[in-house]
Image (spheres, rainbow, N blue to C red):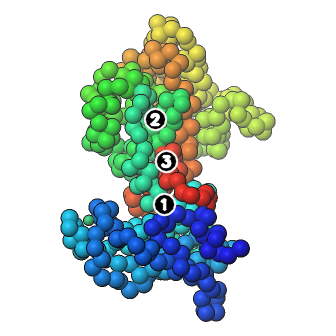
Amino acid sequence: MQLKTILNRVTNYKPFVIASAEFSDQEQPVIEVTMRARSNGKPLCSVCNQPASCYDTLPARRFDFIPLWMIPVVLIYARRRVDCQECGVKAEWIPWATGKNHLTTEYQWFLAGWARRMSWKEVAVCFRVSWDHVFNSVKHAVSWGLAHRSLDGIESIGVDEVQWKKGHKYQTLVYQIDQNNIRLLWIGPDRTAKTLLRFFRVLGKDRTPKLQFVCSDMWQAYLKVIAKKAPQAIHVLDRFHVVQKIGKAIDKVRAAEVKQLKADGYEEVLKGGRWLLLKRPENLSDKQAVKLSQLLQYNLKSIRSYLMKEDFQQFWTYRYPGNARKFLDARCTRAMRSKIEPMKAVARTLRSKRELLLNWFRAEGKLSSGVVEGFNNKVKLVTRKSYGLRTQNAYETTLYHNLGALPEQEFTHKFF
Ligand SMILES: [Zn+2]
C-alpha cells in the first residue's frame, strides 16, 4: 500500500491532490508530501472563501503533519495569491492550515488532545516540537471550541474564586452546574464586581433572565453583582464554601492558640493537628483518630471551634427552611457567646447571609452540593499540573481546555 493511499484515506484536502509522498534525502528520514492544486478550478480567497483569479505563486512552504511512526511528515506546497475583487491580493485558502501556522490543523488538534493528558512540556518532548507549538495548538483548540460552543439552556451556575500564584491573586470562575451539563463557562482575573460583570456580558441579556439558580461563596462583590444581574434566580450560598470559611476561622484560632501555648511554655499539643481538625471524622486514619482523641482531651479553643464546625454539619440535613433557620439562629447565638473571635466573626457573617443560606432548602435539592467542590478540586489539580504557566493567557487556556467541555472539530479520521 502506498503512503498516498493512506493519506487520501485519512485526509480530505479537496480541491487539492497529493502529488507525491517520498522520503527526503536527509540523513534523518522525513516523509515529504507534495501538494498540488487541481488544474481545473480557480483558487479560493482565504478571507472571503470566494473563487478569484490567480495573482502569483509564493515560494513553497512546509507544513508539519502528524508524524508517522515518529517519522516527521511534511506537506509541501507553493501557495498562490489571488486577486480577489472583494479583498484585494490575498493568499489562497488551503484546507490543512490557517494563517501563518506551519503546523497542519490536524496536527494542532492532535497535540492539543495529548495536552489534556500530559503537561505541555511532556507533549513537546514526546513529539519533538517546541513548547510554543503545543501552547499554540491548545490555544487554537480552545478558541475554536469557544467560538462553536452554545451557551443556551443554562439554568444553574456556580461562581467561585480561586487563588492563583502565591499571595492574594484571585481568579473568578463561573461553572455551569446543571445536572446534564457541568462545565467551566468563564474565567477572569481578579474577583471584583467588574470581573463578574464581564461574565454576565458574555452570557448576554437574553440568557441571563433564564438562570434559575446561582451558587456562590460569601464574597461581597459577587453577592452584589448576582443580586443586580440575576434577581430572578435563587441565590444559594453553597455548603462547600461555608465549610471552607469555618475551616479558615479554625485555622486562625489554632494559630493564635499555638502561639499562646508556646509563650506559656506548654508543650505544643496542637502541632501538626491542623489537618485532623479540618478532616471529616470518617476520613481519619486510625493513627490520626488516636491523635485527635488526645487533642480533644484538652479544652482548648481550637477544639471547641472544631466541635462547633462538626455540629454545624447538621444544618444541611434539614428538609424545611423553617427548621434550618431555627438551628442556624441557635448555633450563631452559641458561637457569639463562645468568646472565640474568629468563630464569632463567622457567626456574624452567617447570620447576615441567613436568607441566602436558607435558599439551599428553597432550591429543594435541585443543586448537587458536591458539584462546586468537585470543580474547585479539579481546578486545583489542573493548576498544579500546569505549574509554571505564569501568564493569564496560558492559565485561562489550560482551564478552558481541561474543564470547558468544549466542542472539537471533526476530521475524516480520528487521529486522537
Ligand atoms: Zn476575498
Q: Amino acid at mark 1?
A: Val
Q: Which residue is mark 1?
A: 138
* Disc nearest the viewer among 3 and 2: 3
For image coordinates 71% across by 29% down, the residue present is 282
212 or 298, nearer to the observer = 212
> Does residue 94 appear to the left or right of 1 in the view shown?
left
Q: Amino acid at mark 2?
A: Gln
* Label whose residue precedes the other's in the sequence (1 or 2): 1
Which type of secondary structure does the marked residue at label 3 adopt? loop
Question: Which x, y percent locates residue 131?
Answer: 51, 71
Quadrant the C terminus occupies: bottom right
For image coordinates 34% across by 43% down, the residue present is 191
| 3D distance between C-alphas at marks 1 and 3 | 13 Å
Q: Image quarter for residue 197? A: top left
For image coordinates 56% across by 64% down, the residue present is 11
Question: Which x, y percent locates residue 337?
Answer: 46, 18
Dot 3: within a 10 Å radius of its alpha carbon, few (fewer than 14), some, or many (20 or more) residues? Answer: some
Q: Amino acid at mark 3?
A: Pro
> Does residue 308 appear to the left or right of 231 in the view shown?
right
Whether residue 313 is visible here, answered yes or no, is yes
Dot 1: within a 10 Å radius of its alpha carbon, few (fewer than 14), some, or many (20 or more) residues? Answer: many
Q: Quadrant of ligand 1?
A: bottom left
Dot 2: within a 10 Å radius of its alpha carbon, few (fewer than 14), some, or many (20 or more) residues? Answer: many
* Disc nearest the viewer among 1 and 3: 3
Q: Which residue is mark 2?
A: 176
